[in-house]
Image (spheres, rainbow, N blue to C red):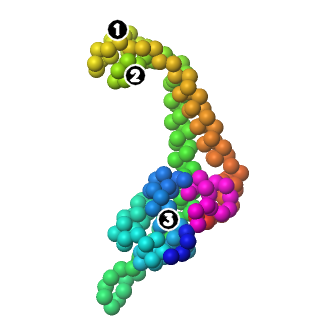
Amino acid sequence: MRKIPRSPKGPEFIKYLHEFVSESIGEKGLNVLLSMGDGATDEIIEQKTKYKIAEIRSLLNHLHSYGFVEYTREKNMQNGWFTYTWKSNRDRSMQNFLMIKKKEVEKLRNGVATEEGAVFYKCTKGCSRMNFDFAMEHKFRCPTCTKDLKYLDNKDELKRAEIRIKAIQKILESKSALATIENGFSPKF
């Protein structure tokens, strides 16, 4: 069995792309992707990874739905069966990764904007979390279990969100990532 490289080579953002594949599909999906090289059939991937063919096909379909891989299909004229050759789609993977990270930053910023100017209350039992106006309408009682509501200090949540936003912005503003997109460079998985 050929050893599959664990740490990416090349620009630093490739490691983020590996993490993105692992988060999206899982470790097995990353192993299948890394075992492909410049193109491989299901059977070749099976030999390299030692996974069952049904599992490989499922992972390949997931990888394809996320845009990590593409395939070509050839028909065997003798038996009528199709052979699929899978290749990584590095450009599309990078575009999807950057798009998802941009959406994540936008969502975090919206959440921070909502959290900063508001006062929140939380059920002592943990059923619900609500803003001041809603809590006042319900006389500072949980609408689910009728327990008392307690003031919620959200400074720690805001700090965590800001740290996450800065980390993602660092990835997005990476000179390597921008150069990749601008120059049409295809990173190696």
**Residue at coordinates 49% horizontally, 65% vertically from top-left?**
31
- Quote the CA–CA distance across marks 1 and 2: 14 Å
Residue at 31% in and 88% down: 79
Q: Nearer the N terminus, badge 1 or badge 3?
A: 3
Question: Counting other residues with Cα less than 10 Å from the Cα at mark 1, is it few (<14), some (14-19), or many (20 or more)?
Answer: few
Query: Which residue is under mark 3?
Result: 31
Residue at (36% x, 86% y) in the render = 76
Q: Disc 2 designates what residue?
A: 129
- Residue segment shown in magenta: 5-18
Q: Is residue 164 above or below residue 138?
A: below
Question: In the image, what residue type sits under mark 1?
Answer: Lys
Position in image of residue 56 (x %, y %): 40, 68
Tell whether 49 sits left or right of 37: left
Q: Quadrant of the C terminus?
A: bottom right
Which residue extends farthest bottom?
Answer: 78
Q: Which residue is mark 1?
A: 139
In the rendered image, the vertical position of residue 150 relative to residue 61, given as above or below: above
Q: Is residue 161 magenta?
A: no
